[in-house]
Image (cartoon, rainbow, N blue to C red):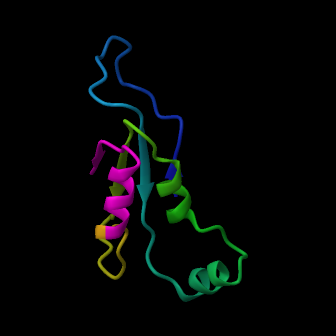
């Protein structure tokens, strides 16, 4: 799940960095894995990572999910090489 169109809590707040993309993991489920492999479900993780560009931040909520991973050295390197300023 990717959360879009977030807004600042205060209209007068100073922006520290660029825009932010929020991503949330969901538990690993066999039906979702099969649907993604067959092309019946979009690859949301790849889409979220592809949207992050220069001066932007990726925020990931794992929600206690420990059976799957969202980020690794290759993905972090990709984000930083594209100019992302932070991953939280």
> Which residue occupies the extreme front position in the image?
81
Q: Is residue 65 magenta?
A: no
Task: Tell me residue 27's x, y (percent).
Answer: 43, 76
User: Residue drawn 50% across and 64% down?
Assistant: 45
Residue 87 magenta: yes
Q: Give the range drawn in magenta.
A: 74-88
Residue 72 visible, this orientation = no
- Observer-nearest of 67 and 17: 17
Q: Is residue 72 left or right of residue 24?
A: left
Residue drawn at point x = 35 percent, y = 56 percent:
60
Please state if 62 lies on the left or on the right of 5 as rendered: left
Q: Is residue 40 left or right of residue 56?
A: right
Where is residue 54 drawn, in percent x and y? 41, 39
Question: Closest to the observer: 14 or 73?
Answer: 73
Q: Which residue is drawn at 30% across and 42% down?
A: 85
Coordinates of residue 44 in the picture (x, y in percent): 56, 63
| 10 and 69: which is toward the camera | 69
Q: Count the marks.
A: 0
Q: Which residue is drawn at 26% across and 26% down?
A: 16
- Residue 12: horizontal and vertical position, in percent? 33, 11
Quarter of the image where one finds residue 9? top left
Query: In the rendered image, is residue 23 in sight?
Result: yes
């Amino acid at each position: 799940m990717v959360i879009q169109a977030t807004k600042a809590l205060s209209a007068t707040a100073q922006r520290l960095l660029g825009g932010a993309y929020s991503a949330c993991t969901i538990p690993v489920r066999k039906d979702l894995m099969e649907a993604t492999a067959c092309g019946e479900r979009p690859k949301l993780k790849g889409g979220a990572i592809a949207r992050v560009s220069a001066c932007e931040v990726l925020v990931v909520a794992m929600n206690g999910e420990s059976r799957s991973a969202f980020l690794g050295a290759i993905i972090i390197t990709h984000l930083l090489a594209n100019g992302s300023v932070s991953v939280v």
